[in-house]
Image (spheres, rainbow, N blue to C red):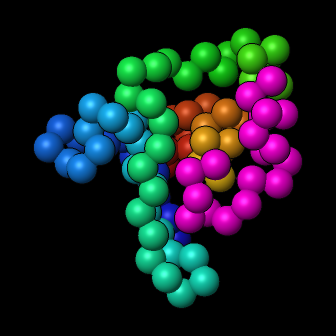
Amino acid sequence: MSSVRRIKQGEPGFGRKKFVATGTHEGKEYTVRFGDANLEIKRDDPGRRANFRARHSCDDPGPPDKARYWSCKMWSSKPVSEVLK
């Protein structure tokens, strides 16, 4: 089981990264910090979403212990609030 949440003040990566994902993959625990803390996700524009997903090969995002996997999830058609649950 994995979980994704925003990084809180005082945690490693605060001010540099926006989200942290933790979980296990193939029996190993992982922690992935991803997303630029100073940028807004502008995924509501269909053109931007399509461009991002094509640029990052989101059709095959790879394993969940990589930042690309979680970034692609954030840029999916699901609302971010549902991804964070």
Q: Tell how many labels.
A: 0
Q: Is residue 73 above or below residue 2?
A: above
Residue at 29% x, 44% y is 13
Residue 80, image x, y percentages: 56, 34
Q: Image quarter for residue 65?
A: bottom right
Residue located 68% across and 16% down the image:
44
Residue 52 at what x, y percent from top left?
74, 28
Residues drawn in magenta = 51-68
Q: Which residue, as the protein is rendered here, is positioned at the far left? A: 10
Q: Is residue 33 left or right of residue 62?
A: left
Does residue 21 belong to the magenta stretch? no
- Quarter of the image for residue 43 reads top right
Give the main secondary structure of the magenta stretch. Answer: loop
Asked if one can make out residue 32 in the rendered structure from this viewpoint, the answer is yes
Residue 51 image point, x, y percent: 80, 24
Q: Inspect this view and state whether residue 77 appears.
A: no
- Residue in front for this viewpoint, 83 or 32: 32
- For residue 64, side relative to residue 48 (left or right): left
Q: Quarter-wise, where is residue 50 in the image?
A: top right
Which residue does the image show at 52% across and 71% down from the upper left? 1
Vertical placement of residue 48 versus 76, above or below: above
Residue 46 versus residue 12 in the image, above or below: above
Residue 64, above or below 56: below
Q: Residue at x 60, y 83 (%)?
A: 26
